[in-house]
Amino acid sequence: MGLPDQAGVMRNLKLLKCLRCAELQGPGSPQFFSVRTDTSTLLVASEYGITELDPRTGQVVSEVSLTAEDYLPEDGSGIVVGIQDLPDQESVCVATASGDVILYNLSTRQLECVGSVDSGLTGMSWSPDQELVTLTTGQETVIMMTKDFEPITEVEIHQDDFGEGKFITVGWGKKETQFHGSEGKQAAQRKITEIQPAMAWDDRRPRVTWRGDGQLFAVSAVCPQTGARKVRVWNRECVLQSTSESINGLEQSLCWKPSGSLIASTQRHPNKHSVVFMERNGLLHGDFTLPFGKEQVKVKELLWNSDSTVLAVWLEDMNPGEDGQLSTYIQLWTMGNYHWYLKQSLNFGTAQERAPSCMSWDPELPYRLHLLTRGWTSLTYDWAWSTERSLGDDSHDNANVAVIDGDKVLVTTFRQCVVPPPMCAYELQLPAAVNQVTFHPESQRTNDLAVLTADGRIFVYSQETGNQSEPSVGASGFRVITQTPELKKTYSVDVDQVEPLALRLLLWLNDDTFLAVGCGELPHQSRLFKLGPSGAHSPEQRLDIRSCVPVDGHVISMCHSSRTGTVALQLEDGQIRKVQWDSSEPSVVEWRNSSGDTVHFALPCVQTALGTISGEEHLFGLTDRSRFFVGDTEIASGISSFVVYDTFLLLTTHSHTCRCLSLSRLSVKGLQTALSSDSGQNDETLRRVERGSRIVTVVPQDTRLILQMPRGNLETVHHRALVLSQVRKWLDSLKFKDAFECMRKLRINLNLIYDHNPKVFLDGVQTFLRQIDSVTHINLFLTELKEEDTTKTMYPCPSSTAAQPAPGGSGKKVDIVCDALRSTMETENPHKYFLSILTSHVRKTTPELEIALQKVHELRVNPPSAENAVSAEEALKYLLFLVNVNDLYEHSLGTYDFDLVVMVAEKSQKDPKEYLPFLNALKKMETNYQHYTIDKHLKRYKKALHHLSKCGVEHFTECLNLVKDQRLYSEALRLYPSDSPQYKALSCAYAEHLMEQQQAEQAGLLLWRCGETPRALQAFVSCSSWRHALCVAAQIPLPPDQLALLARDLAGKLIEQRRFTDAALLLEQYAKDCEEAISALITGAAWEEALRLIYLYDRQDIIETNLKPALLEALNNHSSFLEAQRTLFVRHKTRLSVVRELKEKARLELLDEDAPDCPDAELFSEASSVMTGTNASSKYTHSNSRISARSSKNRRKAERKKHSLKEGSPMEDLALLHALTEIIHTVDRMQEEVHGLLKALVLFRFDSQAAKLQQEYGEVLHLMEAAIPEIWQEDRSQNHTPITGPNSTANSIMASYQQQRPPAAAQQDAELFIPPKMKHTVKWKLSILN
């Protein structure tokens, strides 16, 4: 909340409601009244008694006579000196001048005299907590009593002592010898001015006022020695604290500011009349001058409102007018930024019956003022703060804000200047005090304003449209940036109400039409006036009431939408009405929404505005308790101010943020959600602001938002949402310069210029260059380029906008933009844009430094003659600014241009002793060797190899060493002819490298083709490439015995690798050992091939010795293996069913407990284990991601742990699925092997054994095939619909939803949920065994 002292800065007091009751009639004339807070009635004391009035109904609630009990004389000469409502005692206390203190019980209607003072009473004042009461007596004493009227003490008002707060003199000598500053030495000789006695009209009565906390009270009384008034401050124990200094011209009014800082009084100076302020120590502290002559008025009373923001000054003329009567005024003053503003002036005229008799602020509602006139007319005014701002939303509107200050209107045009109040752009001087200001709503005329003054006239000021084009130069030579509008028309308005402020809530609709609200005929009614010019021709035009519409209820706000023409009213109970004003007879109808339902605010709002949300017009409202409504929906609380601008709603909150929301993209519900939720990191709608900031206005078609700080100063902020919206508009309309300047100034990332619409930018590159027209700015744009798409990261587009346009081209963004800009710059003006062209080369993803350096070198060799061309020195200096000098030096070296190298080196910090010897050595070398040396220095080894290969045979050793060091074998082989010795040497070196890399077969191929057959043979043997080895052996050629040994050696290696068929071929054909060949085939279960060799070499004996035993052994092994697999399969399948039941049970229990994310959520199901990344699998997947980078060994270990079959492990279901899949695949792969075995068994009459094997294998296959749907069916049904219904909770629904979404992290296990497929194409069964 802002400091209350600053409440009036840039804001005006707007009259919300006026209750007027003229039909009341009480006995005598009112002398004092007190507000009864529990019933909101007025307890009025007159010379005859007490009258209770209800200003809302205009009725007298009760009366009690004080003359009947002889408390007051019956002749009407009695005087009441004070009255106070006492809610705790349900009584009212009245003090009379004769000395009686009377208590009247409001419930029992009993009168009681609780005390009497013989010397009479001059005043009564209760402490704010109503625990103490002070009475001033006719003997100039102060009596303090408790609320039960038990005396505490009585002290003399006039005391010689200063009080407990007496100043301490530290002994600085006499006044004549002291330093007097700007007053000069004359101050030492100045005689003390004689204190003048109090004014003749002063009633000489003491005035008592309490501080808001009830700890101190002040008494203003006329000093019997000097006749002048003095103020003394006493504490709660009635001990004198301080006495005011002698103040000439101090008057009777006295009021202590409730916040406790100052005591207000008035002082008449020789040349002015002021309201002055005293501190509690009696010293003066500030003042302001009343807008009257020094002898024109007298101040009857000063009254602070309860929150210390408004000071009411009640004045009366000192000299009667022509009719012999005195005029009465009430002024409302506020202070902001150390300036006092006269916000409202009420002139009650000269009629005695209309003059206020008593006045009081409401003790509970700080902006409600109660008045009672001498003619018993009750007036209750309700005020509220309002910012009067112009209503335009185009660039012609100057963002005007008008501040009322007495008879002046201070206007600040925030488009041109932001000046702190009380200064302003220009002042409008009016002939009378100003009450209201309203701006013209029509486009192009929103800078025009109408001013309603206290004497009932409307002054219309208009600004010539031509004056807005260029600022003019005034007579003083200073530039005039804002033209003061001229007075165009003056209207007088006649309303049939004699009291001031007959019109309120003035609204300017069009040229000569105004709407205003006035009091109704009945207390509960208002009247809506439509004002238009009269037809009569006269020097001063008149506004007549064209129509008057009675409204049931009190209208407290009225707002107008210039876009739609809608006028909305709000009644004091929150009801909303729509005014149909454009017809000949205006009417007021209920506000209805698009569904036809009536809409009203839940609470009355002190600030309202019209706006459109999703195509429907709504009324926005803010209550005095900071609750924000849109129609009948409460959107947020804790809102301190708001404004509707274009399609945006801007709000400031008590949490010190400023929100800017787009109404075109949000519904009412969306608005509520947006304000209740926390914003993200890149949320453009939110901005932190200083504590207590309030919105003053928004500059239309700009990015500026004007905020006022609690201390009164103004700040301009550029809200990110406004800035981005405006930048996007500029970019869409190809206003690149406006967008660029705004983004550069407000530090918006320049990548947005391209990212907003890549295609439009690339199509408009030429427009972009011509508008920017600054090499520096183009360079700035190029240097900020990065691959990030800012529309997705820093400045995400609002969700409901259309999809982003397709990228402007294929490839990397930075390269596309650099190439597009460079080609356009080279076409437009290569000399002018030379530095930008260099930047486009350097900023590419792979910087093209050599090209940039070459262009600088060309510039040096052929300097251009164009005027705007840059020199080579400037270009190189700029290039060094962009690139590290060492990198540039090395790239220049890579161009082999020594002039360029020297040019760069000279600009660097390198010592010539370092680089000159190196360069001189290079210059002496042969060209190719020179280039090789440079490339090797720059570690460009491929280029170095290319140059070195051209240097001749004498450098081949160096070349071979380079190839070996940098492993450039493939590149080197391409540089030499295949028949050259260098090629052979390189091939041998490459083969050695491949052997080291365990690629012996490729090494053998290289050695074989270059003629190194012995080494090739070794290579082929080492990798068991037996066919290549035998070919090389034949080419060598090897003798038969060595060939046989080679074949046996190779066969041994192949048998180790379980390549039995290949081994048998070697043994049979090359080693000529058929028995070993047959043995190898039998070992490898190649039954048919073994039989072929047995009968080929006539070795039937082997059938009995080797083949049949091997067949029976294989039969037993297969039978045992199938039985083991069947048992394991059934066990895993049974366990999987149990695990699934347990997990489903746990999942349902957890859902019932609304805790889907608790640690035991890993028991949901195997679907949730894998298909959701948030529950069970998270601890495994996360740990695996860390392990995966270490080693394959650790990776395998983690995988084994993950697929652990240990009962009760978190992912046992996955492990079981994995194991079942492996069993099925293993058994299914045996079909061809079993088929071969069956054929061999049948051949040798092992029919019964073969039939048994065929039956066992068939049963196992059938068992698995039948189980597949049962095992994997449940997984297919995991994607069931979410659990919803009346018994569901938000957590249970979210948990069931999460089971359906497989995150990317779980894809590695997704294959487990695919049922394995078995081979049905293999005909493995033998029908002869059926």
Image: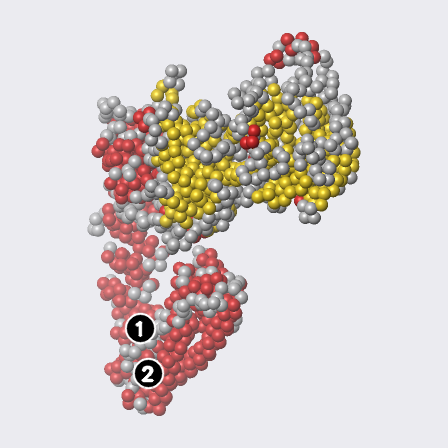
Quarter of the image where the C terminus is located = bottom left
Give me the residue at 52% from left, 69% from top: 1149
Residue 353 percent across, percent down from the top left: 56, 31
- Quadrant in the picture for residue 418: top left
Residue 495 % position (x, y): 44, 34
Q: What residue type is labelled 1?
A: Ala
**Front-most of residues 533 and 165:** 533
Residue under label 1: 1063
Residue 1010 visible, this angle: yes
Residue 1173 x, y percent position in the rendering:
45, 61
Q: Which residue is drawn at 30% across and 68% down?
A: 1046
Q: Residue furthest front?
A: 75
Q: How is the image coloured?
A: secondary structure
Image quarter of the N terminus:
top right
* Kind of residue sitting beneath label 2: Leu
N-term mark: 2 or 1: 1
Q: In which quarter of the image is residue 855?
A: top left
Instruction: Kindly identify which residue carries mark 2.
Output: 1237
Q: Is residue 637 above or below residue 307?
A: below
- Residue 243 percent location from the top left of the image: 71, 24
